[in-house]
Amino acid sequence: MNFYLYSTIIPLVISIICLWFFRPLNFRKIVKGLTINIIPLTFYLLLLYFLEMEEYLKSGWSFYTLLFFLIIYVIIIVFINFISKYIRKS
């Protein structure tokens, strides 16, 4: 249960809170909100790493799961940013 809490539920809550504060209405603002979302997710990833290294958390592979999905998330967001800038210039 802790693995799912640390690797899915808390990052989803962080993402929802970031997008709720940003309130995107069009595609460009959604992309900007998703880009800004990278910062809190990275801080959460670092916090989870340090808590696991100090053995406050014993969640196993949560850090590596989040790291893997954060790398893919960043690649997708960079690609979407490129597409939205290309569409805006056309």
Image: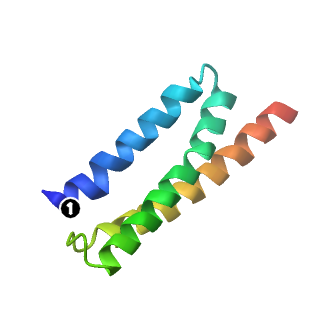
- Amino acid type of disc 1? Phe
Residue 8 placed where, x, y %? 29, 51
Residue 57, x across and y down, in percent? 24, 69
* Quarter of the image with the C terminus in it: top right
Instruction: State the residue lying farthest toward the top.
Output: 25
Residue at 31% x, 74% y is: 52
Up/down of 71 relative to 40, above or below: below
The answer to whether any part of residue 80 appears in the image is yes
Q: Is residue 69 above or below residue 57?
A: above
Task: Name the spot of residue 24 as percent of width and height, x first.
Answer: 59, 24
Residue that sits furthest to the left in the current view: 1
Q: Residues within 10 Å of mark 1 (few under 14, many from 20)?
A: some
Q: Vertical placement of 50 versus 80: above or below?
A: below
Q: Of residues 40 and 61, which is closer to you in this image? A: 40
Q: What residue sits right under mark 1 in the picture?
A: 3
Left/right of residue 47 with respect to residue 61 in the rendered view: right
Q: Position of residue 38 (x, y in %)?
A: 56, 52
Residue at the far right in the pictured view: 89
- Count of labels in the image: 1
Dividing the picture into quarters, in which one does residue 61 lie?
bottom left
- Image vertical order of residue 18 relative to residue 50, above or below: above
Q: Quadrant of the N terminus?
A: bottom left
| Left or right of residue 14: residue 26 | right
Query: Residue sitting at 17 percent across and 59 percent down?
Result: 2
**Quadrant in the picture for residue 28:** top right
Residue sitting at x 54%, y 28% = 21
Picture residue at 58% right of the left edge, 53% below the top: 39
Say whether residue 21 is left or right of residue 10. Answer: right
Element under disc 1 = helix
Query: Could you say which is closer to the camera, residue 35 or residue 53?
Result: 53
